[in-house]
């Protein structure tokens, strides 16, 4: 029996399709090695410090890894490129972004410190980036883009015979800690991740990578860590984490999901290798590689030098002298987040001094330990030193509160665990004893006197605190009066140092850590109102500030 010619052609066509399908299927099911490199919490670390980090040095390492891998790697960042060295802050991270473009990053997600800057500034940064910014759970709250993702929901990249799908999750807590985060809508981390995993798997991706800025430290009952995300959402092959600045010796494995993180400030890069077959992870190797004593990339060094030379004239101006250093860290322990600190004392004393120098009669100053990012050195102090110490550009505010509300605020701050950015620091007029073990306030005095619950106290603090961010919600709810003090924190610190011949940092016992006596119920005893007078309405402060 002869087969008609047109049927022969049809059969041949079907056979070709089958052969193509078999070839594609066979290719897809071959083993594929995927090399990935990642960073997080780099915080404007443009220049190497004491031989550690540096963007040009990082570029050298990444280029050598890319060459060894045959030119195709995944290069990712888990957020917080903002708020760090003065050169980065001065130019709103443009040197960092130019370097990231040069190194060929594939994607980044947003950290909470990306909301230290206004939305317009963040958009400018994103427009300069030659790679996607994954904002899978961050949406615009207002304006013409209301309800739309701030960046892109997900991204895909083909490596060999495998398609890698990527999405980005930012901690919902950023809406409280970020100064400009109220311009955004943050969707639930786990619910968003589950939706994205389902969508990417449905679109045929072979490997799912989550770039997350969540961290590994539990910050409360409603806080989602990267481990919690992996526990609640199946189907993620790799989580690249940021936020907690975790130094990891080995990956954490939860529900077959590998979790890795690369410490902080660009001191290390994470380097890993995945072997994938049949959409399953067959092998996984990973290590931290130190960016230490590395020869900087020549071309990128030249590019960054233009930025540093442009800013050098302003940033290298000397503002004064320190008799000794005021460190922020003792090893890994952040001193301003765990007790009285030389640096916290200096900054708090500086801002209340500056307010009084402008004519504002204030009782004391309170700041949060997380507002300081570097210590001040012994010897001559430059503008750059101060900007790196207090990099957020916080506006100083004068706020008035009844003594009872002030005391309740302090009782709330006693609940803050050491290490949290909301841990308080005070000027020298205050005496505080905190029981950080049982989380109680044991003592609070102003100029040696117990707080008068019915008196209105005038406090110098940051806009971050008066807006109720971090653990300061009660300040926003209970403040009677709130007005700009007329300067930013960095300006106050610079003027304070400049005003003195030599600044001598010292500890004086204003903030002590103690244990509660079982017979003392300080909070209950003091939260009883006496004879509250009518609030004067802040008229005196308005007159001082020239508003009346």
Image (cartoon, rainbow, N blue to C red):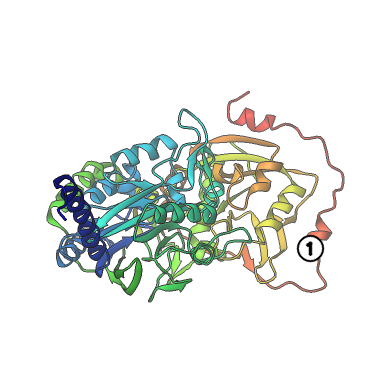
Depth check: give the residue in front, 212 or 364. 212
Depth check: give the residue in front, 504 or 98. 98
Q: Residue furthest top?
A: 548
Depth check: give the residue in front, 150 or 87. 150
Q: Which residue is disc 1 drawn over?
A: 522
State the image coordinates of residue 78 (x, y, percent, origin top left): 38, 56
Work out which quarter of the rendered image holds the C terminus and state it.
Answer: top right
> Relative to residue 516, is residue 34 drawn left or right?
left
Work out which quarter of the rendered image holds the N terminus and state it.
Answer: bottom left
Depth check: give the residue in front, 490 or 113. 113
Packing grade of label 1 (10 A; few <14, some 14-19, many >=20) is some
Q: Residue furthest right?
A: 531
State the image coordinates of residue 341 (x, y, percent, origin top left): 52, 63
Quarter of the image for residue 77 reads: bottom left
Q: Residue furthest front?
A: 1
State the image coordinates of residue 68 (x, y, percent, origin top left): 15, 67
Instruction: Please tell me whether mark 1 sits on a helix, a strand or a loop.
Output: helix
Up the image or down, 207 lies above or below 543; here it is: below
Residue at figure coordinates x 46%, y 45% from the top left: 115
The answer, for residue 51, to whether it is visible in the render is no
The answer, for residue 2, to whether it is visible in the render is yes
- All told, the count of numbered labels is 1
Residue at figure coordinates x 38%, y 60% from the top left: 208
> Relative to residue 509, is residue 259 drawn left or right?
left
Up the image or down, 229 lies above or below 388; here it is: below
> Relative to residue 243, is residue 222 drawn left or right?
right
> Relative to residue 143, is residue 521 drawn left or right?
right
State the image coordinates of residue 490 (x, y, percent, origin top left): 44, 45
Quarter of the image for residue 159 reads: bottom left
């Amino acid at each position: 029996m002869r087969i008609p010619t047109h049927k022969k052609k049809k059969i041949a066509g079907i056979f070709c399709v089958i052969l193509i399908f078999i070839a594609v299927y066979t290719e897809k099911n071959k083993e594929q090695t995927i090399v990935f490199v990642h960073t997080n919490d780099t915080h404007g670390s443009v220049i190497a410090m004491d031989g550690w980090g540096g963007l040009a040095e990082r570029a050298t390492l990444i280029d050598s890894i890319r060459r060894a891998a045959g030119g195709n790697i995944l290069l990712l960042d888990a957020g917080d490129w903002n708020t760090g060295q003065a050169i980065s802050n001065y130019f709103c991270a443009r040197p960092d972004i130019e370097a990231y473009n040069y190194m060929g990053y594939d994607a980044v997600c947003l950290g909470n410190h990306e909301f230290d800057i206004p939305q317009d500034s963040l958009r400018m940064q994103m427009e300069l980036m030659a790679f996607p910014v994954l904002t899978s759970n961050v949406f615009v709250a207002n304006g013409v883009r209301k309800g739309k993702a701030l960046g892109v929901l997900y991204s895909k990249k083909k490596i060999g015979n495998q398609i890698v799908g990527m999405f980005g999750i930012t901690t919902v807590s950023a809406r409280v800690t970020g100064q400009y985060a109220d311009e955004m809508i943050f969707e639930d981390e786990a619910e968003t991740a589950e939706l994205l995993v389902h969508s990417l798997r449905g679109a045929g991706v072979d490997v799912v990578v989550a770039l997350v800025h969540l961290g590994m430290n539990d910050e409360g009952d409603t806080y989602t860590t990267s481990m919690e995300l992996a526990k609640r959402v199946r189907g993620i092959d790799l989580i690249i984490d940021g936020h907690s600045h975790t130094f990891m010796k080995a990956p954490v494995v939860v529900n077959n999901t590998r979790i890795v993180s690369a410490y902080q400030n660009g001191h290390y890069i994470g380097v890993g290798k995945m072997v994938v077959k049949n959409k399953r992870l067959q092998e996984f190797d990973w290590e931290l590689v130190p960016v230490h004593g590395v020869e900087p990339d020549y071309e990128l060094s030249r590019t960054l030098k233009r930025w540093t030379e442009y800013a050098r004239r302003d940033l290298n101006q000397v503002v004064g002298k320190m008799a000794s250093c005021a460190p922020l860290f003792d090893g890994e322990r952040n001193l301003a987040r765990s007790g009285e600190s030389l640096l916290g004392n200096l900054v708090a004393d500086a801002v209340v001094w500056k307010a009084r120098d402008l004519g504002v009669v204030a009782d004391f100053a309170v700041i949060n330990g997380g507002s300081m990012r570097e210590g001040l050195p012994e010897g001559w102090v430059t503008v750059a030193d101060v900007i790196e110490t207090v990099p957020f550009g916080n506006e100083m505010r004068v706020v008035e509160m009844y003594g009872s509300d002030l005391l309740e605020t302090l009782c709330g701050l006693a609940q803050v665990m050491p290490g949290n950015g909301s841990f308080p620091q005070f000027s020298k007029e205050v005496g505080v004893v905190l029981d950080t073990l049982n989380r109680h306030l044991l003592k609070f005095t102003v100029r040696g006197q117990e707080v008068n619950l019915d008196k209105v106290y005038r406090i110098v603090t940051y806009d971050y605190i008066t807006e109720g961010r971090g653990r300061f919600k009660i300040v926003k709810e209970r403040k009677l009066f709130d007005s700009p003090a007329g300067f930013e924190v960095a300006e106050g610190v610079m003027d304070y140092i400049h005003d003195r011949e030599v600044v001598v940092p010292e500890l004086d016992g204003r903030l002590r850590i103690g244990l509660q006596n079982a017979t003392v119920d300080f909070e209950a005893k003091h939260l009883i109102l006496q004879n509250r007078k009518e609030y004067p309405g802040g008229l005196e402060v308005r007159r001082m500030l020239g508003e009346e």
